[in-house]
Amino acid sequence: MGEHVHWMLEVALKNGAAEDFKALMHEMVEATKKDAPGALIYEWSFDEAETACHIYERYADSPATMVHLNNFGTKFAGRFMQYAQPTRMTVYGAPDETVTAPLKRLNATFMHELDGFAW
């Protein structure tokens, strides 16, 4: 079914951090457009109260995923964790060990593809 790697990351925003988190989100979206050519989908959604955010990301393959993860780690992780607490991460697709190792530290659940398609 391909080499794509994708996930849904759910985070709880820390009290009073919504505006700072949204500013960081805009910065991260622009950086991902510019610096991660293998990023296929990068979508952020907030609940009505702006206390929770779901981030859906899809990458062409494991090397493309690692470009993004390395950029995140060096440029954004500190501020991201200052404003939000990850609550759940579900990973899909075909991540290799270079991707699964760092995501295991976030207590990610890895789902293995059985059948289906994406256009």
Image (cartoon, rainbow, N blue to C red):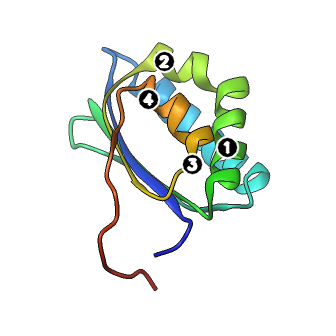
Query: SS class of the residue under badge 2?
Result: helix
Instruction: Identify residue for label 2.
Output: 81
Query: Could you tell me which quadrant the N terminus lies in?
Result: bottom left
Characterize the local packing of mark 2: few (<14), some (14-19) or many (20 or more) Cα atoms within 10 angstroms: some
Q: In screen coordinates, is 84 left or right of 34?
A: left
Q: Which residue is at 41% across, 50% downward?
A: 7
Q: Relative to the observer, which residue lies in front, 100 or 30?
A: 100
Give the foreground label among 1 and 2.
Answer: 1
Give the foreground label among 3 and 4.
Answer: 3
Compute the Cα span from label 2 to label 4. Answer: 17 Å
Q: Look at the numbered discs 1 and 3 and tell me whether their residues touch, using CB distance below 8 Å.
A: no
Label 2 or label 4, whichever comes before in sequence order: 2
Instruction: Identify residue for label 3.
Output: 96
Label 3 or label 4, whichever comes before in sequence order: 3
Q: In screen coordinates, is 115 left or right of 98?
A: left
Say what amino acid the circle numbered 3 marks.
Answer: Asp
Label 3 or label 2, whichever comes before in sequence order: 2
